[in-house]
């Protein structure tokens, strides 16, 4: 959304000739002040490139963006007048490495971005890891805050060379920036990031806050006196949830929790000129947009819906006054599209996915009791549901564990398509999930696989009790933490007749030394595996492998840094040795997220075939 609220710009991922998703994208622009105006392609290039990272100048006259138009795979920063769609963009940088997150200073004199010089791959633990060979050494590539002069293209890194920067925000006076960062390996150390400020002129750094848990989304107050952020236990970079805090911008004092005991999980925020905070939150399995009056700590919900807003926890943008927003909206009945307008009067801008129609049945939000908690989740009905028939059910456990299943168009590993095969599908949000407050999210600390499995099994009981589900035809599936919960569940119960464990964790003790992001584990287990191996052993499926009788399909990417392939090998090998029906598939060149279209299709087809082969009469 442009600062003046008159225009919206977005990037659309292109498709290849065979209709698979491309790595290329195009930027489009629409004039919201002229009702009925058609979106226009913004750049002039005739061939496909990557184009994204849209950043409006504060006067709404220019757009800065990233593109690899000059050299495939190497992003550079460009700037182009907003009033001239189709004109030639001006290239500002000639850098080698990874560029991300451009943002203009409030006075328009500079553009900041994140730059990782000579980076061998895109940043983030979801990407395929670099293979080791020879003497193994840790090669650290630091992502630094870098300032660009939009007139001359002059480039200057302003954060220390030994520090990896994750997120940042400009101060209202343009003299300083707030940022989250840590020293050392960027993929691993996000979980111990601290809050700093840096002078845009001198590079002088000030430590503002060292948190006990994770922080994200730092945002400066309009008067420049405070910095707000989201803090809490977060198992994955980019999957944000917690409470909203504010800390003095000069440091020297503890932050104040502005949303204590709120039964939701804020995931994005920005200050409004009024001094209120506009924020997005996960709540009761859905999404809400609200404002927070900081002095009184009173929140007002502006909108709530059974859908997802944004791509992950981004994809939401506002005008300077906060009265107009642009957002990606998606649900089980709405494929992703751009919407814009006042929060309560959003109108659809794009129709890129109008041809896509749901292949699955209706959904229902369920609630059930487990211990002292009210747990919720989503139940998807079979297509052409007939209440006189008995149906199989598959439980789909989300990753994280700090995440939540919200209504959205299906992704690469999603059990939604089982509905078209005549299954009920239960998507539970057990303890450890976002959406019910920080105390609920932290309730699986030192308790992996215990309370959260009870929550899931009681959810299954609720569905079996109230709907025509055949209790002898139950399945379970998940990826990442969901893959772990699948491995764990089949060692703890014989209720499931089939399982699909994707990128799971079989042995927390060996996992600690194999994965490349071990910092996330200490807040959850209370200590490293070397200091307290027993707490890791207690939740390790491999220690209970003798109990497994459930036919289990195991899948993983061969370059997964988050949940390395040896964990899946270990579980599959144990099942095979003990004579349990199993199959193992390794996807070459894939990291934690399976992205190649042929692999996504193969995984979905194998999953459906596995459940059909083991749960059908």
Image (cartoon, rainbow, N blue to C red):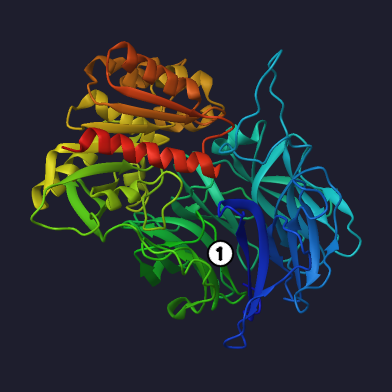
Q: Which residue is drawn at 62% across and 79% down?
A: 5
* Relative image position of residue 391 (x, y in whole percent): 16, 47
Q: Residue at x 41, y 46 (%)?
A: 403
Q: Nearer the viewer, residue 388 or 170?
A: 388
Q: Which residue is labeled 1 in the image?
A: 270
Instruction: Tell me: 222 left or right of 532.
Output: right
* Quadrant (top left, top right, bottom left, bottom right) of the N terminus: bottom right
Q: Can residue 296 be seen in this view?
A: no
Instruction: Tell me: 294 left or right of 487.
Output: right
* Relative image position of residue 2 (x, y in whole percent): 65, 74
Q: Can residue 69 be seen in this view?
A: yes
Where residue 448 sits, quadrant-wise, is top left
Q: Nearer the viewer, residue 41 or 395?
A: 41
343 over 77 or under it: above or below: below
* Relative image position of residue 21 (x, y in whole percent): 57, 52
177 over 517 or under it: above or below: below
* Relative image position of residue 550 (x, y in whole percent): 24, 26
């Amino acid at each position: 959304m442009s600062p003046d609220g008159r225009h919206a710009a977005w990037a659309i991922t292109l498709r290849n000739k065979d209709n698979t998703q491309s790595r290329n994208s195009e930027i489009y622009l629409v004039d919201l002040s002229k009702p009925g105006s058609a979106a226009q392609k913004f750049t002039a290039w005739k061939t496909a490139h990557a184009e994204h990272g849209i950043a409006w100048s504060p006067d709404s006259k220019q757009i800065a963006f990233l593109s690899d138009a000059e050299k495939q795979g190497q992003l550079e920063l460009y700037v182009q007048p907003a009033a001239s769609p189709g004109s030639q963009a001006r290239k500002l940088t000639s850098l080698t490495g990874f560029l991300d997150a451009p943002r203009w200073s409030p006075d328009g004199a500079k553009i900041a971005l994140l730059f990782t010089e000579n980076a061998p791959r895109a940043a983030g633990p979801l990407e395929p890891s670099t293979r080791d060979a020879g003497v193994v050494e840790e090669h650290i590539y630091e992502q630094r805050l870098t300032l660009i002069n939009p007139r001359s293209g002059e480039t200057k890194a302003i954060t220390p060379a030994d520090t990896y920067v994750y997120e940042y925000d400009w101060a209202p006076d343009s003299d300083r920036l707030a940022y989250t960062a840590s020293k050392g390996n960027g993929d691993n150390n996000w979980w111990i990031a601290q809050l700093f400020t840096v002078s845009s002129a001198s590079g002088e750094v000030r430590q503002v806050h060292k948190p006990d848990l994770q922080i994200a989304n730092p945002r400066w107050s309009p008067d420049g006196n405070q910095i707000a952020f989201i803090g809490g236990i977060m198992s994955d970079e980019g999957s944000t949830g917690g409470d909203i805090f504010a800390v003095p911008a000069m440091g020297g004092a503890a932050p104040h929790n502005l949303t204590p005991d709120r039964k939701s999980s804020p995931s994005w925020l920005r200050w409004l000129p009024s001094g209120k905070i506009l924020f997005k939150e996960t709540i009761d399995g859905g999404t809400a947009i609200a404002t927070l009056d900081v002095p009184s700590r009173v929140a007002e919900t502006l909108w709530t819906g059974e859908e997802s807003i944004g791509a992950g926890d981004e994809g939401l943008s506002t005008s300077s006054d906060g009265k107009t927003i642009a957002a990606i909206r998606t649900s089980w009945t709405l494929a992703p599209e751009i919407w814009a307008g006042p929060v309560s009067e959003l109108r659809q801008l794009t129709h890129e996915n109008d041809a896509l129609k749901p292949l699955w049945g209706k959904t229902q939000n369920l609630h059930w009791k487990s211990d002292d908690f009210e747990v919720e989740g989503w139940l998807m009905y079979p297509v052409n549901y007939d209440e006189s028939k008995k149906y199989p059910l598959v439980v789909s456990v989300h990753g994280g564990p700090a995440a939540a299943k919200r209504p959205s168009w299906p992704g690469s590993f999603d059990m939604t398509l089982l509905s078209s095969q005549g299954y009920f599908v239960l998507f539970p949000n057990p303890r450890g999930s976002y959406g019910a407050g920080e105390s609920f999210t932290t309730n699986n600390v030192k308790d992996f696989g215990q309370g959260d499995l009870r929550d899931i099994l009681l959810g299954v009981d609720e569905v079996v009790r109230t709907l025509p589900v055949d209790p002898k035809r139950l399945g379970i599936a998940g990826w990442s933490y969901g893959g772990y919960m699948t491995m764990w569940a089949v060692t703890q119960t014989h209720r499931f007749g089939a399982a699909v464990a994707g990128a799971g964790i079989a042995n927390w003790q060996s996992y600690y030394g194999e994965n490349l992001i071990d910092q996330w584990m200490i807040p959850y287990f209370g200590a490293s595996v070397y200091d307290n191996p027993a707490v890791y052993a207690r939740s390790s499926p491999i220690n209970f492998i003798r109990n497994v009788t459930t036919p289990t399909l195991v899948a993983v990417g061969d370059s997964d840094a988050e949940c390395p392939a040896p964990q899946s090998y270990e579980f599959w090998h144990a099942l095979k040795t003990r004579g349990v029906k199993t199959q193992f598939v390794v996807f070459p060149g894939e990291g934690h997220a399976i992205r190649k279209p042929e692999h996504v299709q193969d995984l979905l087809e194998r999953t459906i075939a596995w459940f059909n082969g083991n749960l059908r009469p």
